[in-house]
Amino acid sequence: KQLQGTWSLIPIPRTDPKEEWIFNDGTLYRKKGNNNGSAPVPFDTATYSVKTGLSSVKIKIENFKAVLDELNGTWDVVTLDNDILFIATDHDGTSGIMQREFQKKD
């Protein structure tokens, strides 16, 4: 339930375009905009599922097409509350960790 809704990506570096991820009943919408103040527009969609364990939460993202599979895979939820979402992945076993940080949009 906490995952549902619109999350604004905290861009690193700050020059990256504005980006939002919208989690809605198994579909993940990714929107991008630019830094001239324009609102993000639809960019790509994927499917997602959530698996919870005793001490972990994982989000499996599949079928993003516009990012060459960079964001597809299983992500560990590092932090999730009403305002912040941090996720990280090692691309299902490959070396190196990628992390994305979001702030909940009102």
Image (cartoon, grey):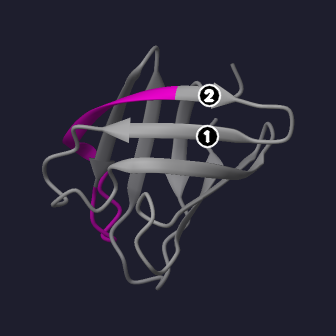
Residue highlighted by disc 1: 58
- Residue at screen point 69% across, 19% down: 1
Residue highlighted by disc 2: 51
Residue 70 horizontal/vertical position (percent): 28, 62
- Residue at screen point 30% across, 46% down: 31
Which residues lie in the magenta part? Answer: 33-49
Q: Secondary structure at mark 1?
A: strand
What mark, if any, has residue 93 been given in the picture? none
Q: Is residue 25 above or below residue 84?
A: above
State left or right for residue 10 relative to residue 71: right
| Tag 1 near tag 2, CB within 8 Å | yes
Q: Inspect the image, locate mark 1, and give the three-letter code of the amino acid beneath it.
A: Lys
Mark 1 and mark 2: Cα distance apart in space: 5 Å
Q: Quadrant of the C terminus?
A: top right
Mark toward the start of the polypeptide (1 vs 2): 2
Residue 83 horizontal/vertical position (percent): 76, 44
Does the segment drawn in magenta span residue 45?
yes
Q: Quadrant of residue 61?
A: top left
Does the segment drawn in magenta span residue 59?
no
Say few, some or many: other residues with alpha carbon within 10 Å of mark 2 (under 14 / 14 to 19 / 20 or more): few
Residue 40 horizontal/vertical position (percent): 31, 49
- Residue at screen point 57% across, 27% down: 50
| Frontmost residue, 67 versus 16 | 67
Residue 100 horizontal/vertical position (percent): 54, 63
Q: Inspect the image, locate mark 2, and give the three-letter code of the amino acid beneath it.
A: Lys
